[in-house]
Amino acid sequence: MKNKLKEVAIHEKDTGSSEVQIGLLTDKIKNLSKHINKFKKDRHSSIGLLKAVNRRKKLLDYLKKNKNDSYKNILTKLNLRK
């Protein structure tokens, strides 16, 4: 996932842009999904997963509204459906 974050980043030390945040949240969502499949009764992790999904959705909506070309780029690089 680190290589994809470098592709998405605007510059070398970029950590706060919407694109990088979406990449980090996508990685977190994948890890939490694996964990929840293994431990189905872990409610705290499932709440964290829902929060991460909602945060990523808000960031994607922001990109779609303000930076449409970057939005399309993110969807293809991270293999997200929208």
Image: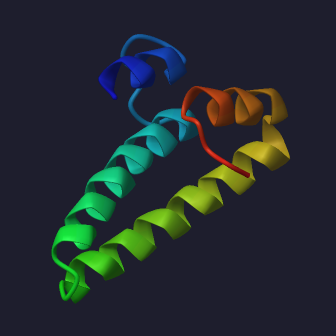
* Relative horizontal placement of residue 19, taking residue 6 as reference (left or right): right
Left or right placement of residue 12 versus residue 73 in this view: left
Image-based side of 5 in relation to 28, left or right: right
- Which of 9/48 is in front? 48
Q: Quadrant of residue 14?
A: top left
Q: In this rendering, is residue 51 above or below 77?
A: below
- Quarter residue 13 falls in: top left
Percent coordinates x, y for residue 69 in the rendering: 80, 27
Please tell me which residue is depicted at 43% across the width and 47% down the height of the picture.
26
Taking the spot 20% from the left edge, 64% from the top edge, the residue there is 35
Q: Nearer the viewer, residue 2 or 10?
A: 2
- Image position, residue 65 (x, y; %): 83, 48
Q: Identify the residue at image location x=76%, y=32%.
A: 72
Q: Residue at x 66, y 50 (%)?
A: 60
Farthest residue in the front direction? Answer: 38
Using the image, determine if residue 81 lies above or below residue 79. below
Residue 46 percent location from the top left of the image: 31, 79
